Amino acid sequence: MKLIRVAFFLLLAASAAQAKIVTQSVAYDQAGVTLDGYLAYDDSKTSASNLPGVLIIPEWWGLNDYVKGRAEKIAKLGYVAFVADMYGGGMATTDPKKAGELAAPFYGKPLMAERARAGLDRLLKYSFVDSSHVAAIGYCFGGAAAQALAYTGAPLAGIVSFHGALIPASPEAAEKNRAKFLICHGALDPFTKKEQLDAFLKSLDDGKIDYQFISYAHAVHAFTNPDADKAAAAGLSGVGYNAAADHRSWKHMQAFFSEIFSKKA
Amino acid sequence: MKLIRVAFFLLLAASAAQAKIVTQSVAYDQAGVTLDGYLAYDDSKTSASNLPGVLIIPEWWGLNDYVKGRAEKIAKLGYVAFVADMYGGGMATTDPKKAGELAAPFYGKPLMAERARAGLDRLLKYSFVDSSHVAAIGYCFGGAAAQALAYTGAPLAGIVSFHGALIPASPEAAEKNRAKFLICHGALDPFTKKEQLDAFLKSLDDGKIDYQFISYAHAVHAFTNPDADKAAAAGLSGVGYNAAADHRSWKHMQAFFSEIFSKKA
């Protein structure tokens, strides 16, 4: 026991000395639109070796503090996190009507994958990112965008969709896809109809996509975001934070990253 | 980096010195039937503190080497594992016809939960088991038995069903249940019809049971058992080993145990 205590103390001391998260806004562009992404990494780790990269695609609210916080948490896990700016100018809103208007031009359009791809390409430019170990994760609208990006054949080891809208894989999309999928879904999410969920999973089966689908009891839409309760209080129905589902899906994402970022994978 | 390396070395040395798995057959009985369970634990850990307990309920094949191996793996994780003998005399078979005959008296009958409960009670008798942190896990037939046991209100923090037959929770069962559920399911399991799966999940939702349902791509029935390929080669259809789903579900079980065995939970 004494050996173990000494070892843990050393580990703790070592990691406390090392944890230094760097964050910065990063300007880039896509088809003439100026975008303002958000980078986060632990620079003591990037100086030691190339790290896996994680593209993060925000909810329809845009590039807000919530998603920046996620990027910092990803950085603390030892990955290089980059939040894609989907709307331009790093825009964010708390107004559902405005968010709906901002998101509308993306759904069902090539723009969704193209704008996400611009973020991915920016992430891949960092010399300290291991380009063979990159994932995309996304929340709600962003979960759908991560799927759309994978369906274009983007160089992704995996994607994670948290309460994402679900886009069935066409046979062509499944053929192009190179990513493993982790789909984290609220069992009571009213934004996704049963038939939509069934059609989505069937398309993954038919397309032979390697996926894990997880349904979390009691969880409705936006279950990872504490601010969902504010939105619900302001009148948006079907959304709510669920701490258990949030913590569980975060653990499941970490297990998924361990698998897809393994050097043996 | 040097500090970390030293720390890891010490941890490794400490854990190698400690790992000592004890296994033994354990006679017990239920309603006059003599049963022969299988206990596994790390006795360097049981001497230090009370450990969470894990009841393991075998596939319809009975108490074979596969399930004993699982018990030893659970012991290595730091838990006290006890494999329930459901058939008596520690019986096991590789003949599907015989297995079907052995399992038949249990499905839909109180005997399924009663026989599992006898195993749980035996496990709880060990003074080194922390009786407030006990789970039941089961494979195939055993997954169903773990559900049936939970539905009686048995003192379980959680259950894990691996490619288990799925038993919908009646309102009475949901009311009695005290366990969180982790349901690990093969996306292509032909033993479970879509309507059965839907009815099962709906019953958990309606009963407000705290569950996580995970569907693993490409996996058919018995995906955790390498011997499933032998059974398939011998003519049993719909079964097969799937290494990815096996490893993933094992990790998911560990994350689940971390949650339900937490002292804060």
Image (cartoon, coloured by chain):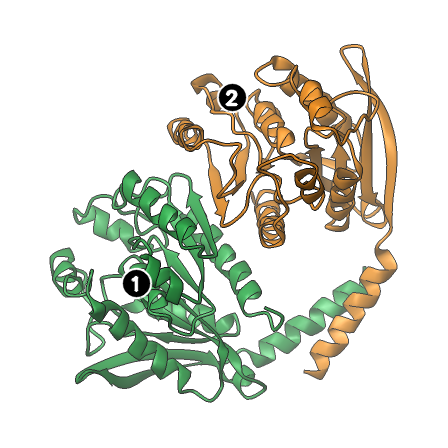
Chain colours: A orange, B green
Residue at 32% across, 45% down: B199
Residue A6 place in picture, x, y as percent: 76, 77
Q: Quadrant of residue A54?
A: top right
Q: Give the amino acid type for the residue marked by disc 2 in the picture.
A: Lys
| One can see residue A50 in this view | no
Give above or below for A126 relative to B143.
above
| Mark 1, residue position | B142
| Mark 2, residue position | A176
From the image, which quarter does the C terminus of chain B lie in? Answer: bottom right
From the image, which quarter does the N terminus of chain B lie in? Answer: bottom right
Residue at 30% across, 68% down: B65
Mark 2 against mark 1, which lies toward the viewer? 1
Q: Say which element carries label 1.
A: helix
Question: B50 or B211: nearer the eye?
Answer: B211
Q: Give the amino acid type for the residue marked by disc 1 in the picture.
A: Gly
Residue A185 place in picture, x, y as percent: 52, 41
For the residue carrying disc 1, how many other residues have a C-alpha within 10 Å: few (<14), some (14-19), or many (20+)?
Answer: many
Residue B243 place in picture, x, y as percent: 41, 49
Give above or below for A113 relative to A161.
above
Question: A117 or B167: nearer the eye?
Answer: B167
Residue B168 place in picture, x, y as percent: 31, 53
Q: Residue furthest top?
A: A32
Question: A61 or A178: nearer the eye?
Answer: A61
Labelled disc at residue A41: none
Residue at 69% across, 18% down: A101
- Dot 1 falls on which chain? B
Asked whether, in this view, residue A90 is left or right of residue A210, the answer is right
* Cα gap from disc 2 to disc 1, whole angstroms: 40 Å
Give above or below for A6 relative to B246.
below
Residue at 30% across, 59% down: B144
Asked whether, in this view, residue B228 is left or right of residue A73, the answer is left
Task: Count the numbered circles shown.
Answer: 2
